[in-house]
Image (cartoon, rainbow, N blue to C red):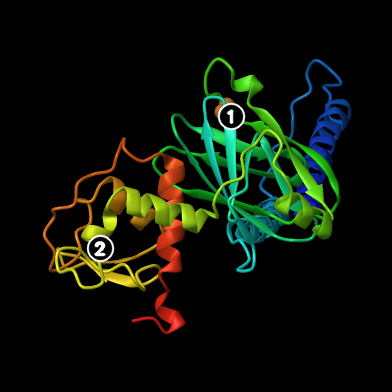
Amino acid sequence: MASRVDTHFWFLLGVAAFFTTLIAGLIVYFMVKYRRRSDDEVPGIVHGSLALEAGWSIIPFLITLVVFFWGASIYVTLARPPDDATQVNVVGRQWMWKVQHMDGRREINELHVAVGRPVRLVLTSEDVIHSFFIPAFRVKMDAVPGIYTQLWFEPTKVGTYHLFCAEYCGTLHAGMIGRIVVMEPDEFQRWLSGPAPGAAAGLPVALAGEQVFQEQGCGSCHRADAARAPNLAGLFGSTVRLADGSTVTADAAYVRESILRPAAKVVANYEPIMPTYQGILSEESVMQLIEYVKTLGAPAGGQP
Ligand code: CUA
C-alpha cells in the first residue's frame, strides 16, 4: 500500500505545485504587462469569456474527480482486510501496546510478522484513545476504548520498522513506541514456537477464552440445553432476532457489548437477567471470549 499512498501524495503535491507556479507566474506577468503606463490611462472594459470560465471550472473539476476516485480506491483497499489475513489482537493502554497472536504468544511494544502475509490487527484500548501508527507501511488506526477498530497490512520487506502512538494520550505518550519486526516465514514460525524472552507465551487465544468462560461460570446459563440464555453454538456471524423485533449480526462488537452491557440488545424470547461484566473482565479477556465464541461454530459451517 505504501507505494500507492505515496504515488497519490506526489500527484497531489505535483498538481498543487503546478497551479501555484502557474498562478504566481501569471500574477507577476500580468502586473508587468498591464501596468499603468501614464497618469490619465483608463483601463478598457472587459466582458466575460465563456471559454476561459468554462475551462477553469471544468478542468479543476475533472482533476478533483481523479483525486477523489483515486483516493477512494486506496481507502477502500485499506478499509477491507483480505479474508486470509492473520488476526492479531492489540490493546493499547497508558503507555504501552499489548499484542497477542492467536496461538497465544504475547508481546509488549513489539509485533513480529512474516513477510508477504497479510496481517489484520484488531485494536481496542483500556483507557484513553491511542493510535497505532506504522509510518513505513503508511497505516494508522485509532485504538478507542469501548469499540474494536481494525487495520491491515502486508509487509513486503524483511526488516524492523518504527511503531508509534499517534494520538496524544498523556504524560508518556512520546514513550509509547515500539517496533514491527518483519521476518522470513520460516523464521517467523520458529519465533512463534520458540521461547518467549521477556514476554510470556500463553494459551491460544480461543482456549484462553474458554478458560475465562469456565471461570466466570458463563456455561451455567449458556448451556446447549438451558432455557435461560441463548445457546452460543453457531452464534458468531449469524443474524440474531432481538426482543424489540429488530435484528443484529453477531459480530465481535455485538458479542463484546452483550458481555459488558447485556441489557443493550436482549435476544428475543429471553429475559434480561444476565449481569454485566464491565469492570470484571479485562479487554484482553473479552477479546479471548470472542475468539472462543467464534470456535463454537459459524452458521455457514453446517452448525445448527
Ligand atoms: Cu498512546 Cu499516545
Nearer the observer, 291 or 62: 291
Q: Which mark is residue 96?
A: 1
Residue 77 in the figure: left or right of residue 207: right
Q: CA distance from mark 1 to mark 2?
A: 35 Å
- Assign a secondary structure to mark 1: strand
**Residue at 77 percent of width and 50 percent of height:** 2
- Assign a secondary structure to mark 2: loop
Residue 170 appears in the picture as rendered: yes
Q: Which mark is residue 222?
A: 2
User: If the image is split into quadrants, where does the N terminus sit?
Assistant: bottom right
Nearer the observer, 227 or 283: 227
Query: Where residue 112 sits: x, y (%)?
Result: 73, 46
Q: Is 283 rendered above or below residue 77? A: above
Q: Is 168 rendered above or below residue 271? A: above
Mark closer to the chain start, 1 or 2? 1
Query: Where residue 25 sits: x, y (%)?
Result: 86, 33
Q: Is 121 rendered above or below residue 97? A: below
- Residue type pointed to by label 2: His
**Residue at 44 percent of width and 81 percent of height:** 300
Nearer the observer, 289 or 31: 289
Q: Which quarter of the figure has residue 190?
A: bottom right
